Each structure stands twice: as C-alpha cells, then as structure tokens.
Amino acid sequence: MTTFGLPAECGRLIEYDTAADLQELRNAGMLKETMPIGGGSNILFTTGRFNGTVLHCNNTTVNINRSNSSGAVEVYAAAGCNLDMLCAMTCAEGLWGMENLSGIPGEIGGAAVQNVGAYGAEFRDLVKHVICFDPSTGNETTIENADCRYGYRDSVFKHPEGKNLIVTGVVLALSPTPKPNRNYAALAAAFKDTADEKLTPTDFRNEILRLRTAKLPDPAIAGSAGSFFKNPVVSAQRHREISARFGREIPGHIVPAESSDVTEPDVKLSAAWLIDNAGCKGFSQGGASLWPSQPLVIINTCGQATGEDVVALEKRIIQTVRNVFQVELSPEVIHI
Ligand SMILES: Cc1cc2nc3c(=O)[nH]c(=O)nc-3n(C[C@H](O)[C@H](O)[C@H](O)COP(=O)(O)OP(=O)(O)OC[C@H]3O[C@@H](n4cnc5c(N)ncnc54)[C@H](O)[C@@H]3O)c2cc1C
C-alpha cells in the first residue's frame, strides 16, 4: 500500500467508506492508535512494523456543483478519490485549477494533509474547506481554508491541534473560465504564443505529464516517495554567508514575505542542487539509492530495500550536505 514498495506490516488494516463507519468503529473502541493512509506515496515505514491500526478510505465519490453564485465551480471529492483521476476529470470538464497538479500520486485526503504542490501551484490555492471526522468527539467537522494553516508541505493536520483528525472529504473551488497558471518557466515557454482563451486545462495537464515523466521515476518501475527532502529556507544573510564560503552564489528563490515589516525576505534553496554539489551523486545504501536524474528522490533500487536502508541513506545525505554547506536538510516524507 505504499509507493516505496518496502516490506511493512501493521497490527490491523481497516477500510471504511463514510463518517458513519468511523462512528461505528469509534463506538467499538477501534479508533485507538490509528494512522490514516491514502495512496501511501509520502510515507516511510522505517522499521517495517507499525503495531497500530492503519485506516484507509475507500470512498471515491466526486460531486460537481456548477450552480454557485460566486462564479467558482465547487467540487466535492471524498478522501479516497485518486488525486490524478480528479485532475483528469476536472480538466475534461473544462475546469481550471487542478491541471498543474497532474501526475502527483496519492489520494485527496493525503493531498489535503500534505498541501501538495508542483509547477507553481499548491493544493491550498483550490481548497474551500476540508471535512474531517474527529475521533475525540465522534463528530464530523468542517475546517475552512484559512484554518487549515497551509504552508510549504504543511497544514494543521500535521500539528498537535489537527493530527488526530481523519479527513473524509474536501470541497475545492475551481474556475470555469480560463485561468492558466504560467508561473513555472517551462510552462510559460511552452504556451508563450497561445492566448488564455485558446487554451484548455487539458493542454496544461498534458504538458505537465510530459515534464514529470522526464524527471521523476514511475513508482511502478522504481519505488519511491517522490521528493524525499524539502527545499531548505534560510535568511538572506545566511544565504550570502554560505555562498561566500562556497565561492559562488548558491541558487535559490526569494520567498515572498507574509508581512510588510520584513526588510529582507528569506531564500528557498534547491535541496537537489545542494545534494548534487555536496557530492552525493551515486550514493546508495543496501537496496536504496539516489535517482540519477533527480537527486531529491531516494528509490528502492531493485525492489529489495528495507526501511532501515532508506533511513541510513537519508542520514548520510543529511550529514554530507551539513558538512559541505552547513545547511540542514529535513525530510518531506513522513516517517512511521
Ligand atoms: C513519484 C512521486 C512523485 C511525487 N510528486 C510530488 C509532487 O510533485 N508534489 C508533491 O507535493 N508531492 C509529490 N509526491 C508526494 C505525494 O504524492 C504527496 O505528498 C501526496 O499528497 C501524498 O498523498 P497520499 O494519499 O499518498 O498520502 P499518504 O502518503 O498515504 O499519507 C501522507 C500523510 O497524510 C496522512 N493522511 C493520508 N490520508 C489521510 C486522511 N484521510 N486523513 C488524515 N490524514 C491522512 C497520512 O497519515 C500521512 O501523514 C510524489 C510522490 C511520488 C511517489
């Protein structure tokens, strides 16, 4: 049930459809020591054993509501709905918003927790609200976008206040009128001669799928959890210091400041560049290795890796980058 394809066992696996199922499980005392799983595309079972209960939502319901007075089209998707399937469906319906997220593995519940992002778009840009089951009260609750506290691969669902919530569905607000997101340079270049009105979301989806295939391993061929590390964010002063020590400017993007009081915005460094330039190319450990065309990805080389191999390789990469750049990498992948 994970895209890494590592051997892993759990105490119990429960698949459910609705909040009523979760209520019944709670009443039977079966929602203790649980861990929700979606497509398992961002999870690493470090020891190969989780003694608790893994919960998976089988509900893939999608409802499209075009009669919204705000002009946006509201799309409800249950937590078990496949993210890329929803991208394909909404693009085919002519709705804008999801196209840049095409090709990301996983399910809607996981996307809402992780705030997935790619090619200049993030899931939070689309979320109206997230519907959750709260095992502590036994009730379903709706969390508005602003209260999801979305950040870079972050949300309230990853912090103590929201960690115990089980996402059962999401309502997205999509645009029926053209709203192409050309923020990513390769997309801007691909469509530079085409006016917005001449484009369809499926044009963008197809281009994104083409770009992704060239860069990322297909989990069916080489198990992985996508980008293993987050791009580290440092202060502008720190960026100057490490660039001076390295002898040339370390590539990075300015992070737009959230407040006007900030005089110098932070800089997001490329973890892939740091890993490459720290000399990690070709690193492997047991059955785990770095993906040659994207050093941010750790793969299960011949399907023989264990969680321990991946953790040992992760530690070696973090240590090497620390030694060369004095920058601390942190994993995007959730460790269980
Ligand atoms: C080849 C590849 C490419 C990838 N590319 C990208 C990319 O471009 N951008 C990007 O952002 N990510 C990318 N990822 C990472 C991954 O696909 C996303 O993080 C995805 O959203 C995870 O969804 P999932 O359903 O697989 O979640 P899982 O991995 O199953 O779970 C992730 C977390 O969410 C929690 N969770 C899952 N479902 C629920 C629920 N219903 N209620 C509460 N908590 C829940 C889990 O407990 C866990 O903490 C990639 C992964 C792979 C393998």
Image (cartoon, helix red, strand yellow):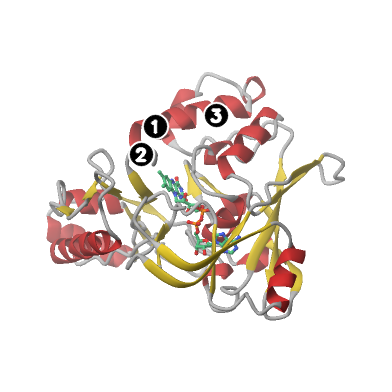
Task: Please report contact status of discs 3 and 2: CB closer than 8 Å, yes or no.
Answer: no
Spatial CA distance of label 2 from label 1 is 6 Å
Residue 274 visible at all: yes
User: Image quadrant for the C terminus?
Assistant: bottom left
Residue 278 sits in which quadrant?
bottom left
In-image side of 74 versus 29 (left or right): right
Instruction: Judge by depth and name the residue closer to the eye, 26 or 144.
Output: 26
The location of residue 120, given as percent across then percent down, is 49, 43
Marks 3/1: CA–CA distance:
14 Å
Q: Which residue is mark 3?
A: 204
Above or below for 306 versus 49: above
Q: Residue type at mark 3: give it.
A: Phe
Instruction: Work out how far the residue at label 3 is from the one at label 2, CA to CA, in angstroms.
Output: 18 Å
Question: What residue sits 63% from the left and 51% below the top?
Answer: 80
Labels 3 and 1: the sequence-earlier one: 3
What kind of residue is marked 1? Answer: Thr
Q: Which mark is residue 186?
A: none
**Nearer the camera: disc 3 or disc 1:** 1
Residue ID at (72%, 32%): 177
Q: Which residue is mark 2?
A: 216
* Residue found 73% across the figure and 78% down from its top: 27
Of 216 and 247, the residue lying toward us: 216
| Label 2 lies in ligand 1 vicinity (Cβ under 8 Å) | yes
Q: Amino acid at mark 2?
A: Leu
Disc 2, disc 1: CB below 8 Å? Answer: yes
Q: Secondary structure at mark 2?
A: loop
Q: Quadrant of residue 51 in the image?
A: bottom left
Question: SS class of the residue under badge 3?
Answer: helix
Mark 1 lies on residue: 213
